[in-house]
Image: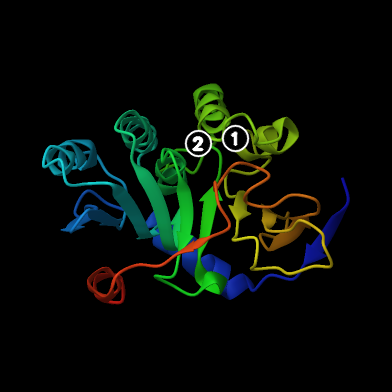
């Protein structure tokens, strides 16, 4: 499969990684139920499954909107994905949804990119399990993660890409999935990017040609979901 290397802003990347590693027990995921849309933003942590159960118990939730989440606890991300799928809910993304958040997004029966943030700043990010304190990879958790990604994407996620995602050479490596319209090409599928840490600690990103969000099963539609004004007001907050 041919690839195209792309330049990456090191300072911007390091800022993102610093934000991801700053997740602590003092910060929790923020839940806002607006009509039938449950907005979930911030890091994925230990109490989030219980909070999610409380929201779903209202019988109002039809859509889970994931907004600007750096991820967090792997078990809770997997459990939230499972519960979303079992409840028959749809998911949508606004802004960055990385790590455990990416797994939560895949739990949706129907999965959309939304107009809550510009498409240029909206993405799903997946990576291998690692200890947030030691930064050491935890490949023993890769099999379960791979199974979840494969099942949630209806077995569309390519096996070779899946292996590189859940068993990365460096724990900092990421696979990003953008909306199909984010990188326009002459009839070519694009939107899946691999960002790998180099020996000099910089990152190089390459577009995986021939794949996009729909072909790998990350999203079920190229439609950009339009959010109502009240929901847009919530996600527009700093």
> Along the line of sight, which residue is nearer the eye, 206 or 80?
80
**Secondary structure beneath label 1:** helix
Q: Is residue 104 above or below residue 181?
A: above
Q: Which mark is drawn over residue 166?
A: 1
| Residue 68 in sight in this render | yes
Question: Where residue 120 is drawn, which disc sits there?
Answer: none
Position of residue 191 relative to residue 117, above or below, is above
The residue wearing badge 2 is: 129
Quadrant in the picture for residue 12: bottom right
Whether residue 72 is visible, yes or no, is no
**Is there CB contact under 8 Å for labels 2 and 1?**
yes
- Residue positioned 54% across, 70% down in the render: 119
User: In this rendering, would 158 be left or right of 210?
Assistant: left
- Residue 235: % across, % down: 30, 70
Q: Nearer the viewer, residue 83 or 187?
A: 187
Q: Residue at x 53, y 60 (%)?
A: 223
Q: Quadrant of the C terminus?
A: bottom left
As drawn, 116 above or below 112: below
x and y percentages locating residue 20 in the rendered image: 42, 57
* Residue at image location 63% in from the left, 40% down from the top: 165
Element under label 2?
loop
Percent from the top left, x then y, of residue 136? 52, 38
Q: Is residue 215 left or right of residue 97?
A: right
Which one is earlier in the sequence, the residue at label 2 or at label 1? Answer: 2
Give me the C-alpha separation between circle 2 and circle 1: 7 Å
Q: What is the count of numbered marks?
A: 2
Which residue is at a point 74% across and 33% down the rendered structure image? 160
Horizontal side of residue 105 vs 61, given as left or right: right
Q: Is residue 39 left or right of residue 104?
A: left
Neighbor class of circle 1 (other Cα within 10 Å; few <14, some 14-19, many 20+) is many
């Amino acid at each position: 499969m041919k690839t195209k290397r792309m330049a990456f802003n090191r300072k911007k990347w390091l800022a993102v990684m610093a934000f991801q590693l700053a997740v602590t027990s003092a910060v929790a995921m923020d839940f806002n139920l607006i009509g039938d849309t449950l907005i979930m933003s911030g890091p994925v942590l230990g109490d989030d499954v219980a909070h999610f159960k409380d929201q779903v118990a209202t019988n109002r939730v039809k859509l889970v909107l994931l907004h600007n989440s750096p991820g967090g606890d792997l078990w809770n991300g997997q459990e939230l994905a499972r519960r979303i799928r079992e409840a028959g809910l749809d998911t949508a993304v606004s802004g960055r949804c990385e790590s455990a958040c990416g797994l939560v997004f895949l739990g949706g029966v129907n999965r959309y990119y939304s107009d809550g943030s510009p498409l240029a700043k909206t993405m799903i990010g997946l990576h291998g399990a690692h200890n947030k304190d030691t930064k050491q990879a935890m490949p023993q958790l890769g099999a379960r993660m791979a199974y979840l990604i494969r099942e949630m994407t209806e077995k569309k996620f390519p096996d070779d890409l899946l292996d590189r995602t859940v068993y990365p050479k460096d724990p900092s490596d990421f696979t990003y999935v953008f909306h199909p319209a984010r990188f326009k090409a002459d009839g070519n599928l694009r939107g899946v990017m691999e960002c790998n840490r180099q020996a000099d600690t910089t990152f190089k990103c390459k577009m995986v040609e021939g794949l996009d969000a729909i072909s790998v099963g990350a999203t079920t539609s190229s439609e950009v979901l339009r959010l109502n004004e009240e929901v847009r007001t919530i996600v527009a907050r700093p």
